[in-house]
Image (cartoon, rainbow, N blue to C red):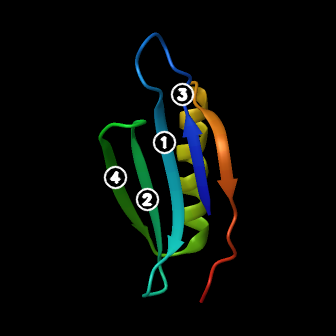
Amino acid sequence: MRLLLQQPAEGHEAPRFVQLMLQPDLLGGWTLVRESGQIGGRSQMRREQFMDQASATRAFELARDAQLKRGFLQMSAQDEAPRG
């Protein structure tokens, strides 16, 4: 599962983005990857590990909802079927 959110540009600054990715790992757990930064600039990436898909999906949804409340707009979404 992958989601790209973008904040509208204000003034001359490049817009900010947040990308959320939910991926299965090789040990049967799940990883939530959050990447954020300014488009065309530096970004920061954080990873969180979860033991099961339900808790990982819940964290993904909470992260998405928090960014939507901050004024980010959903630009694209990709719902991949988990492999494994």
Q: Secondary structure at mark 4?
A: strand
Q: CA distance from mark 1 to mark 3?
A: 9 Å
Q: Is residue 25 above or below residue 7?
A: below
Q: Secondary structure at mark 3?
A: loop
Q: Secondary structure at mark 2?
A: strand
Task: Kindly identify the amino acid type of the residue bearing the numbered disc 2.
Answer: Val
- The residue to which callout 2 is attached is 33
Instruction: Specify the quadrant of the image occupied by residue 38.
Output: top left
Which residue is at 54% across, 64% downward?
A: 22
Instruction: Specify the quadrant of the image occupied by residue 57.
Output: bottom right
Locate residue 15, reporting x and y percent: 47, 27
Dot label at residue 45: 4
Q: CA distance from mark 1 to mark 2?
A: 10 Å
Q: CA distance from mark 2 to mark 3?
A: 19 Å
Looking at the picture, tell me which residue is in the foreground, 54 or 30: 30
- CB atoms at circles 4 and 2 under 8 Å apart? yes
